[in-house]
Amino acid sequence: MQYGHELATVQPSLIHLSSQIGTGRNLSDREVPLTVPFTSGHGTYIFGEVWRHRSSSTTHNPDIMGSQEQTTLVTQNQLFYGTFIYPKTLTELEYLYNTAVAVDQNGTIVAIERDCDLSRVTSTLLPRLGWAPDSVTIHSSSTSHNQFFFPGFIDTHLHAPQYPNVGIFGKSTLLDWLKTYTFPLEASLSDPAKARTVYNRVIRKTLSHGTTCAAYYATKDVTTTNLLADLCLRAGQRALVGRVCMDQLSPDYYRDASAADSVAATRESIAYIQSIDPTGAIVRPVITPRFAPSCSAPLMADLGKLAAETGLPVQTHISENEDEIDEVRRLFPAKEIGAKGDTYTHVYDTFGLLTDKTILAHGVHLSKEEVEIIKARGSKVSHCPCSNSAITSGAARVRWLLERGIEVGLGTDMSGGYSPSVLEAARQAALVSRHVAMTCSPEKGSKANKDGIDRERAKLTVEEVLYLATKGGAELVGMKGKVGGFEVGMEWDAQLIGLGRDVADPEYDGGEDEEKEEEEGNVDVFGWESWPDRVAKWVYNGDDRNTRKVWVKGRLVHQRK
């Protein structure tokens, strides 16, 4: 039986720096763990942590890798033991103590044993699964360091090329911010070398914050959009990757020449992404009209047809800023486009872009009529509280959306958002909901205002924001029932969170140990807190220092020293 992260056996000649894999060392921009497809008796899937050169199917970006060699490997079954916490419902967290979770070679949870000790599990559960003890890797959470396993976070909206601008937005509002900061930076990432540096960094940074799946906007450049997909696949981070479509109201140096050119380039990127991960286990393409103002009516119509043809997800922005909404009304008069109404939502609906796989970022200023249309189409909303506050777009009424049947996830929306952390987005979602509550003026004789918002009900709890960060996000990215929790049949996308030793422990007397505790973050646990209170402390005070390890589909993709 083996403890810790165990590497599969592969041909040494195909491994680059194999001795460093899984050690937690800081990787250079050119050194990213690679996910590789292999075939077993159970079928073909993507799994395993190795270093290898690009296979022949990905020669579109020859500057990324040199050799065209393909590696086949075998991975081990794994057993995770300790404390597990995950959203059971929107309002309830499940707490499992002294529990064992068995994860097979496919990265799938195949058994859960509650209220047990490790020796009993190894003597009873493993034989029941037909697993030889020496073929299983065991990972345990440390009770002395307040560790627990939690599902991986899902970031349902972020712009990978904007990462260098995180925290830079001055006093801008949306449209000015795009012209001043965003378009120039995105255009510069047509340079593959620069794009590689930025994309490697954003992937590594988001993984270090526990993001196991991200819905990425790239740029309009096909080659570097494909590069982003390559790098996500190599790092093992699940991703939707979209080439941004925009043929109007953008600088001449950064727009598609025509609607036809935009769709052709999008098809090219879709084909490439599907070629490097045919099953979509790790990376998938997503149709990405930037937002209505930057897309002509012909372009949106063609992208709507493409969505219907391919069945692919769609991601775009909606009702983020009041000036943006006015611009949409000006550009797309209902009579001219044949819409049934003059709202932002009607524009997308007219062009077939509202589907049950559509992710709509922001939704700050949606009307009741718009929400009814979005619900009818099965489209979903990515709540981005950090960016909505940073560029003064407004406070989204998340409770109002949820109560009207809209599925909601969280997005960091870098670089309008200032942080790569979904935990920060969850924290801000809770705080923004309180601002919504504070601005509610109930109607006479009612607890709710004219929009039906109840001051107390508007506030989101710790349990609710963690649901949005995990299971809620899974709904948006098409992975409902697959990730976001710890249940048999789900895949092991998880974080090991460590809050540090109890500071009131008599054996803890400061000194060198205190310095180590400071490295574990801002959360202080005294020992008398309940687990729900510890989780609340993590939500409001935690950061990437608490994220000790991260797994995607059973594979260790991040380990903090």
Image (cartoon, helix red, strand yellow):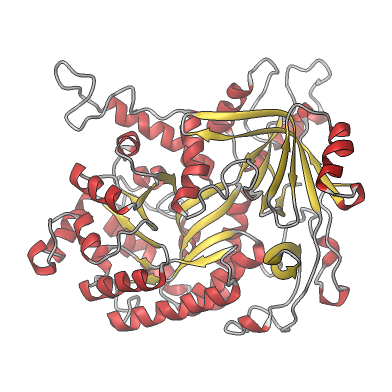
| Residue 244: x %, y % from top left | 39, 69
| Residue 305: x %, y % from top left | 31, 73
Left or right side of 487 for 286: left
Residue in front for this viewpoint, 233 or 440: 233
Residue in front for this viewpoint, 25 or 74: 74
Q: Quadrant of residue 146?
A: top right
Left or right side of 553 for 260: left
The residue positioned 16% from the left and 22% from the top of the image is 443
| Residue 557: x %, y % from top left | 69, 55
Residue in front for this viewpoint, 58 or 217: 58
How many numbered discs, if any?
0
| Residue 553: x %, y % from top left | 66, 55
Residue 427 visible within the image:
yes
Residue 418 visible within the image:
no
Left or right side of 427 for 169: left
The residue positioned 31% from the left and 40% from the top of the image is 396
The residue positioned 33% from the left and 28% from the top of the image is 458
Residue in front for this viewpoint, 31 or 557: 557
The residue positioned 21% from the left and 49% from the top of the image is 322
Farthest residue, direction left: 335
